[in-house]
Image (tube, rainbow, N blue to C red):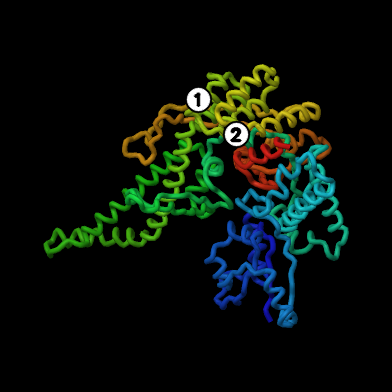
Amino acid sequence: PVVLSAISAASSTTVELNIALKRMLNFNAPPLKNTAAEPVWKVLIYDRFGQDIISPLLSVKELRDMGITLHLSKLEDIASAALAANAVTQVTKVFDQYLNFITLEDDMFILCHQNKELISYHAINRADIQDTDMEAIMDTIVDSLFCFFVTLGAVPIIRCPRGNAAEMVAVKLDKKLRENLRDARNSLFTGDSMTAGQFSFQRPLFVLVDRNVDMATPLHHTWTYQALIHDVLDFHLNRVVMEEGMGVEPSPAGARPKKKSRKTYDLTAADKFWQKHKGSPFPEVAESVQEELDTYRAQEDEVKRLKSIMGLEGEDEGAISMLSDNTAKLTSAVSSLPELLEKKRLIDLHTNVATAVLDHIKSRKLDVYFEFEEKLMSKSTLDKSLLDIISDPDAGTPEDKMRLFLIYYITAQQAPSESDLEQYKKALLDAGCDLSPLNYIKQWKAFTKMAATPANYGNSGVKPMGLFSRVMNTGSQFVMEGVKNLVLKQHNLPVTRILDNLMEMNSIPRNKNPFQEAIVFVVGGGNFIEYQNLVDYTKSKQGKKVVYGCSELFNASQFIKQLSQLGQK
């Protein structure tokens, strides 16, 4: 008899979720290592939720190695067919899998990608939301978080601010965890799962934060590689989709224009360049891609040179001695050929992706926006006026200008006077901006003023460096002329500051041991800027481990659309 495991939602932080998935695909038994036995062939049935969970973790080859040669999105069909054929007796077991979340990095997870608008910032903050709708949203978030902690095999210590959606999630999650622990016989936190968890010695800190504590960061123009890709390209579930021209020659008169081809690139943990540089400032990335390209070309030239030597004709002594000297070198060069080809594939990938990002930086002056916003957020002296940038037709899209103005409005300690605001609004309208997001942010700011103190962005800022060295060379793939070589100064964003206070026990004196492990979760959506800030913070804290999670992952464009919807009501 065959055990059918139907995935309607799955995943782990990558190692844990990977183990959990492989266990499920091995009939809920631990997968055997280095076994010579034939795998048991299985049919994997999944829906779109399941697909989103599996795709960042397992490749088609890995699925095949586990005995899955066919994967079908036929979840409902198979249940109906089993009933119709009176074959229900063939199903020997059905396992519940607590894997309802998606892992994008070892230290990052999101709740869902399909139907994410159901638990979006817009859904939670609608003025006309009914209590029953809010309950349903909170239950969906809590169910996924419960799955996360079951997979981790850890019962967290929960902390959250009061009076917002994050507190509602905290209360419901606390109740669900307690109920499960109360039933000792059926508890999911006993036995194998607890020993398998990566947090085994100390309960992890779980910090729930509401998106409303920091509204500027999701709108910020960024400068690090991964966050820039997410901001300016089509980047979902670790996959970049780019449109490329099908050829440079023009179509004949009267013929249909040639279609652009779509290229997809997977940015995975196996890509060493990506792992090393995804958090680096863009100019550094461009320089590193160029270095990799130069190294590759040198290796390729060496292989070609050795091949031509091996092809020497004649039997004179010089040729024979050269032949023996170079045989070992060529053997080594040829054995490294697959490695060289893989290196070439990754260099091409990052050359194409980085070039596409650079095109956006140059055409929209994103370096100017990034530098100006960093100064606004750190209350530094501004070297040009906000109106000048908004009014400059060559600086960015209407959306870029709106993002900049919203950051100014959110971070300003003193709101602009009515006459100043009218002047800004006129300039924004002249630039083609939709003012709906501003309508919502005005309401949000008025409410936040009554409720609490505004977010502190710390001593952020950037320092311009000298001109690029290698990338300014004429032979470079990247023509960086006119783009500023900005280097980030390390600073903590509001979410990181909240975590730091709790991890360092600044607010809980009764507990003497500072936390070593923490999970930060943003209710209402998160972004790669916040994630990278936490990664940088963790690097500076020896022995600490931090995981970032959010109800949905959006870029500034997606977030501003939600603000626009809220501002139209």
Which quarter of the figure is the N terminus placed in?
bottom right
Q: Which mark is residue 220?
A: 2
The residue nearer to you, when weighing 506 against 214, is 214
Q: Report which quarter residue 398 is drawn in.
A: top right
Residue type marked 1: Asp
Q: Which residue is mark 1?
A: 392
- Label 2, label 1: how far apart the Cα atoms are: 19 Å
x then y, percent, for residue 253: 33, 50
Label 2: how many Cα within 10 Å (few below 14, some 14–19, many 20+): many
Residue at figure coordinates x 86%, y 56% from the top left: 179
Residue at the front extreme, as displayed: 254
x then y, percent, for residue 468: 40, 32
**Mark 2: secondary structure:** loop
147 on left or right of 278 = right
* 210 over 93 or under it: above or below: above
x then y, percent, for residue 372: 55, 26
The residue nearer to you, when weighing 22 against 375, is 375
* 252 over 222 or under it: above or below: below
Which quarter of the figure is the C terminus placed in?
top right
**Mark 1: secondary structure:** loop
Residue type marked 2: His
167 on left or right of 49 = right
